[in-house]
Structure formats: C-alpha cells, structure tokens
Image (cartoon, helix red, strand yellow):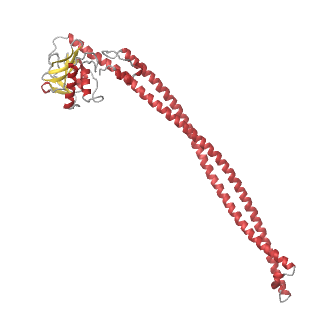
Amino acid sequence: MKKIIVAALIASLVPTVAIANPPRTPKPTQAQIDAAKKAEAAKKAEADAAAKKLRSAQTTLRTLTAVSVAKTKLYNQAVAELNMKIKAANIAMKHLEAAQASVSAGRRAIGKMAMNAYVMGSGFTDFETLLNSDGPQDLADRLSTLDALGENNSNALDRFKSAEVVADAARKAADLAKQAQESATLKVAAAKKEADIAKAMQQDEVDRLQAIQDKLAKEFAVAQKTRLTLEQQRQLALLEEANAGIARTVVNQSKVWPDTGFTGRLSTRSTEAMRTQAVAFAKKQVEARKPYVWGDEGPNAFDCSGLVYAAYRSAGLGWPNWDRLNSSLYWVATQRVKLTDLVPGDLLFYSYKGNVSTIHHITIYAGGGMMWEANSKDRGLLYSSIYSVKGMMPYGGRV
C-alpha cells in the first residue's frame, strides 16, 4: 500500500499533527511518522490511565455491592421478625378480648347474685319460691344449692380476673416487642437505603469511567492505525519509487514479458459500469493536465497507482473493497486478463524484470491499444500507447 496523508486523513485521524494546506509530498515523511508515533503514545497513556481508574472504581463497586447485599439480607430478616411480632401481638389481643368478654359475662352474673343477696337480706324476695320448702330437709337442700351457686360464681370470677391479668400482660409484652422491632426495622431500612444509594452512585461513576475508557481505547486504536498506515505508505512508496528508478537504468527490457503462469484473484469486484466510470475519470484528469506527484491520489495531482485508486473510488469501489495499493500489489489484487481480451477499465502493469516484485508502473486501459496513465514527473499524465512503456506484463488485471 502506498498512500500519503492528505488533509482529510490528518484532520480526522491525527489531529495533533494536522497542518493547514499541507504541501504535496512524494510520500509520508519520517517527521509525519514520528508525530503519529507521539500521538499514539499519548493516546495509549491516556487510555491506560483511564483503565486504571476504571479498575479502581470497579473494585469499590464490588465492595459496595457486597455491603448492599448484606444490608438487604438484614432488612429482609428484620421485616420477617417484625411480621412475627405483629402476629404475636394480634394473637395476644384476641386472647385479651376473649378473656375480657368472659370476665364481663362473669361480672354480670356476679352482679345479679349480689343483687339477689341484697334482696335475700331483706327477706329473700327473689328466693321466696326456692325457700318456700315443704320442711326442714327441703329447706336445707335449697340453701345448699344456693351456697353452691355462689361459690361457683366466685370461682368463675377469680378465673376470669386471672385470665384478664395474663392476657393483658401478654398484650403489653407483645406490643413492646412489636414497637422494638419496628424501631429496629426502621434502622435497618435506613442502612439498606444508604447502601443502595452508595452502590447506585458508584455504578454511575463506573459507567462514566467506562465510557471514557472506551472512547480513549478507540482513539488509541485510530492513532495506532494511523501510525501503521503512514509507515506502510512510506515503505510502499519507497518500493515503487525505487523500482521505477531502477527501471530507468535497466537496458534490454522486453516490450512484453513472456507468460510464466502468473495468477491473481479468482473473481472481480467491479461492474462494466464501474469500469466505464473509472476510464471517464482518468480521461478527465489527463485532459485537465493534472501534475504527476509521487504518492498522490488527487484531487489535484496523482502518481500512477494514485490515479487508479482515485478512478475506481469515483466509480464506487471504496475501502475496504478497494484500497490504495502500490503497483505490484494491484497485480495480485486483480483477476488475470489476456492482453487480447482487455476491455476499457482493465489495468496494465510494467516491470523491469518480468516479475511481481519489480513492477513499477500501472495504467488504465482506454481501448484500442491506448491507455490513461500518470507517467512521471517530467511527462505528467498521458494518453498513450500501451506499448510506449517497456516491460509490460503478459496479462492485464480486471478490478
């Protein structure tokens, strides 16, 4: 691949080395690469620092989450105990109500007895029928019955009073226990709420730091890719430049190299319409007399592979389906086509030794044995015969 950094790439990928109206350069300079390395290192340092903060925040979050879980468990236990205390208090209240009802009934019976006793004291008015016996024995039996009734009611009253005391004590104890448990539950609920709030705040902090770390990681990846791209572009440009320089000094190059069984891609990526558009684009650049600049891909200047790349990019083949390669890499990235089967838009390659590693020039076939090319700094962009450059490879390449 042989790209240079144009203004858009610098502005979008390496803002720290952006230059207003950058001069045309034959290839990425070492200074640009060094600046890209510096930008990459700075982004890596930022990303590493953010990752460290994120790890610390995640550790704190795990601790707060554990506290929140423990507080929730205590809260659930407190609620369960409170429910038991409430149930016990309700049961005690029911017992008290039952005892109070029984005592009330007993009091009414004893009250009636007291009234009867009072009446009896003035003549046994309510017991006249009972005491109107037929003889002493009958009277004694009736009096014995009266004594038994009085004793039973007295015993019943004592029992009811005891039940009332016990039930009232149970109610008081249950109420106290319920109140204590309600207070404890409120305290536990407050602790749980505090833990939940702390956990939620820490989760927000972790999310914020995660977003920062993700952003910096992406920026670091972009800076790293920019640096690698610059280095690759420079190496590819140097290779093509060296091959072209050597080709000018090599004598006895064949017009067309013999077929030695080269292979390329098994399929094409372009349509006929795309190839037609690529030819029209190349023609327009030649006719506009655009200058030749090493490593440039337009819009104001081109080298040979830059013209090919820009032409097919204008036809809709953009990265990653089509990339800015150097001449030899275009050879392996296209489908082999015999020279007799060329159609407009196919690519032609020129080598000074007839092998892939010494390919130094690439052109776009225009039809009729002619081609559109970015020839050299001295000759510029041309419409020329496909045989005007020595060392043509025995096959064309179809994109």
Relative side of 194 to 15, left or right = right
Q: How many marks?
A: 0
Quadrant holding the C terminus: top left
Identify the image quadrant of residue 283.
Answer: top left
Q: Furthest residue to the front?
A: 288
Front one among 158 and 16: 16
Residue at x 59%, y 49% (from the top left corner) = 76
Residue at x 70%, y 56% (from the top left corner) = 174
Residue at x 63%, y 44% (from the top left corner) = 190
Quadrant holding the N terminus: top left
Relative side of 6 to 213, left or right = left
Residue 339 sits above or below residue 388 on the image: below
Q: Is residue 228 visible?
A: no
Q: Is residue 344 visible?
A: yes
Q: Furthest residue to the right?
A: 122
Residue 67 sits above or below residue 316 on the image: below
| Relative image position of residue 208 (x, y in whole percent) | 50, 33
Relative side of 192 to 101, left or right = left
Residue 101 sits above or below residue 254 on the image: below
| Relative image position of residue 290 (x, y in whole percent) | 24, 17
| Relative image position of residue 104 (x, y in whole percent) | 74, 69
| Relative image position of residue 320 (x, y in whole percent) | 30, 29
Identify the image quadrant of residue 100.
Answer: bottom right
Front one among 384 and 320: 384
Identify the image quadrant of residue 315.
Answer: top left
Front one among 65 and 287: 287
